[in-house]
Image: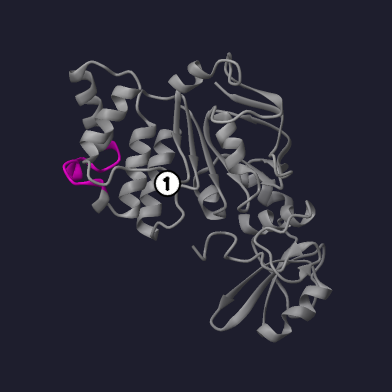
Amino acid sequence: MELRIENVSKTYSNGVRALDGVSLTIPTGMFGLLGPNGSGKTTLMRTVATLQEPDEGWIRFGKIDVLEDKESVRRILGYLPQDFGLYPNMTAETLLSHLATLKGIINRTERADMVEALLKRVGLWDARKSKLGGYSGGMRQRFGVAQALIGDPQLIIVDEPTAGLDPEERTRFLNHLSEIGENVVVILSTHIVEDVAEVCTSMAIIEKGRVLYVGSPQAALEEVRGRVWLTEIEKSELPDYEREHRVVSTRLRGGKTVLHVVAEERPGEFFSGTEPDLRDVYFLKLGDGNGAGAASGPRRNGVGAGASGAAAGEGR
């Protein structure tokens, strides 16, 4: 089973072109849709989830025409949006049972068994009688996964699911997604590069509504292997390096500014070769596509000067 998106475009009434001829083929497994905030990821996910119409293009999931047969899509879809509401005074068990009823699971015994299985799967069974208003951020996200799994969906969409989670909650959440993605199509839409690097077998990078890269994270790394160089400088030296080199990312380490630079040959005696990571690829693709990423301030040879750890989710 695969999801095919062909030439999908969307322009809002305010003139913003959120999607510009997006074409993707997404196979079974974990697929990362990676891009900065405002890149069009949520618009694309809402369109696939049948919550809005594109201006042009078509989408098919297996034999289902997503745009024409919305009811069939919704029966096999699990969706965890970026912002989903919970009833704070309801327990996890009660709300999940209610949502299962709305999705057509009418038999009380079947529904109770399913609720138990889902809450155990996401590690919330012991907290099933607790009110949702008292859940931590990670627990709320795990409940979101449970509701998205009602009815054994074949297509699951999760939009910015780990933003705001602490490291332990994030790891637990991604492990759950990886297990789920073994047999169904799971789309992880995020601006956090590390999430995609850790759990996705295929990915796309999107910016300003356009697809800049499609492939596996490993293939993306191979594109830049041997071309990424590292050096440590004082922060005051950064503007000079930005003018002279193709800087793709910066980060602070021990009070020093660490630069990653892309060049065919060693750019200077103070540079050393380094293994690329997916952040290097991400910011390089954004630069090649004239995307600003999380940029503010001066440009660095086509890459936004803010293209650092914050855009990769480190500041969240």
Q: Amino acid at mark 1?
A: Leu
Q: Which residue is mark 1?
A: 174
On the image, the x and y values in percent for residue 187 come to 53, 36
Q: Position of residue 232 (x, y in %)?
A: 66, 79
The residue at the point 62 percent across, 58 percent down is: 279
Q: Quadrant of residue 61?
A: top right
Residue 45 image offset from top left, x and y in percent? 57, 36
For residue 230, side relative to residue 112 (left or right): right
- Residue depicted at x 50% and y 48%: 160
From the viewer's perspective, is residue 1 above or below residue 274? Answer: above
Q: Is residue 262 above or below residue 220?
A: below
Range drawn in magenta: 120-132
What is the secondary structure assignment of the residue under circle 1?
A: helix
Residue 203's image quarter?
top right
Between 39 and 166, the one lying in front of the other is 39
Neighbours of disc 1 within 10 Å: few (<14), some (14-19), many (20+): some
Residue at the far front: name it.
13
Residue 20 shows in the view: yes
Task: Give 182 or 97, whichever is nearer the viewer.
Answer: 97
Q: Which residue appears at 47% of the width and 40% of the height?
A: 81
Q: Is residue 208 magenta?
A: no
